[in-house]
Amino acid sequence: MAASANATRLVFLALLGALTASAVLLAPASGSDAGKVKASVIGRTASTPAPNCPTPNVDNPPANETCQVVNRVTGFQVSADGSSGPFKVREPGTIVAWSVDLSRPSREEQTFFAEEIANIGPPAARLSVLKPKGDGGFKLTKQSAVVALNPYLEERPVFTLNEPLRVNKGAVIALTTTSWIPDLAVMGAAPDDAWRASREPGQCGTEPNDTPTENETDLKERSRPHQKVGGTRAYACTYSGARMLYWAYYVPRG
């Protein structure tokens, strides 16, 4: 049978104790194809799993097959497909476009994520440029405009930036969602795949000494995206066995 809203909530709570990415949202930016510019792709790997969602229409689906998204957070992949630092900029250049691989949660699941996670509404996202500051902190140096993702569910759109983002060597390209994005892959991800989130220490939603309700509150209400340009935030939470599926199109500085 199809998962009910209550069943989806139970799955969400069950996942709080696992080191996987829970409640993630993604939003595309509108624009033309980035092929007009000769660009390399930051974050590309040889193998890419498909994003979760919807939950299989069966009784008691496995946890790694249930619909999971990224919510109210800025995050970046720290390891993917055996590569470390896939979103680290190696040389100065310009980000001209970005892309995201979106699944399509069921109508019931979409309602759950939009209403139950602190009434955050439909999926949306923006690209962010971070500068490492040490001790797990990152400074937000640049960001693109927020894009509504509802029109692009179950697609892999490419969004050209009207105002390209200049980046320096050592910068980290992250994805920010002000609500939620269904670009999270758990089934098919490697155990050493991991992403990092702009959440404070002790608020990762996976704390073994916290109750399920406390962990749920961390993810649903305390989690905040990093959006103040010039501001520094802690990125204290790392989630293993999951992939955030997004990419940036990069042109080296000539």
Image (cartoon, grey):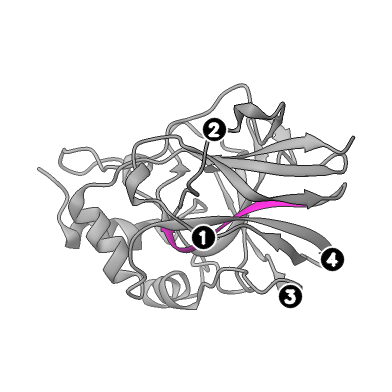
Q: Depth-wise, is mark 1 or mark 3 nearer the camera?
A: 1
Gap between marks 3 and 2, in whole Å? 31 Å
Relative placement, left or right, of 13 versus 177 is: left
Q: Magenta span covers which residues?
A: 172-180
Q: Depth-wise, is mark 2 or mark 1 nearer the camera?
A: 2
Q: Amino acid at mark 3?
A: Gly
Taking the view exactly as shown, the residue that stands out farthest to the left is 1
Q: Amino acid at mark 4?
A: Lys
Q: Nearer the viewer, residue 130 or 252?
A: 252
The image quadrant that residue 142 belongs to is bottom right
Can residue 179 be found in the magenta stretch?
Answer: yes
Q: Position of residue 47 (x, y in %)?
A: 57, 23
Dot 4 corresponds to which residue? 133
- Using a 10 Å C-alpha cutoff, classify the residue at mark 2 as few (fewer than 14 neighbours), some (14 to 19) or many (20 or more): some
What is the number of the mark on residue 231? 3
At x 70%, y 72%, the residue is 233
Q: In the rendered structure, are the residues bearing label 3 and label 2 in contact, judged by CB atoms less than 8 Å apart?
A: no
Dot 2 corresponds to which residue? 33
- Using a 10 Å C-alpha cutoff, classify the residue at mark 3 as few (fewer than 14 neighbours), some (14 to 19) or many (20 or more): few
Dominant secondary structure, magenta: strand
Taking the view exactly as shown, the residue that stands out farthest to the top is 46
Q: Amino acid at mark 1?
A: Val
Helix, strand or loop status at disc 4 = strand
Which corner quadrant holds the N terminus? top left
Gap between marks 4 and 2, in whole Å? 34 Å
N-terminal of the pair, mark 4 or mark 2, is 2
Answer yes or no: is residue 229 visible: yes
At x 67%, y 66%, the residue is 236
Gap between marks 2 and 1, in whole Å? 18 Å
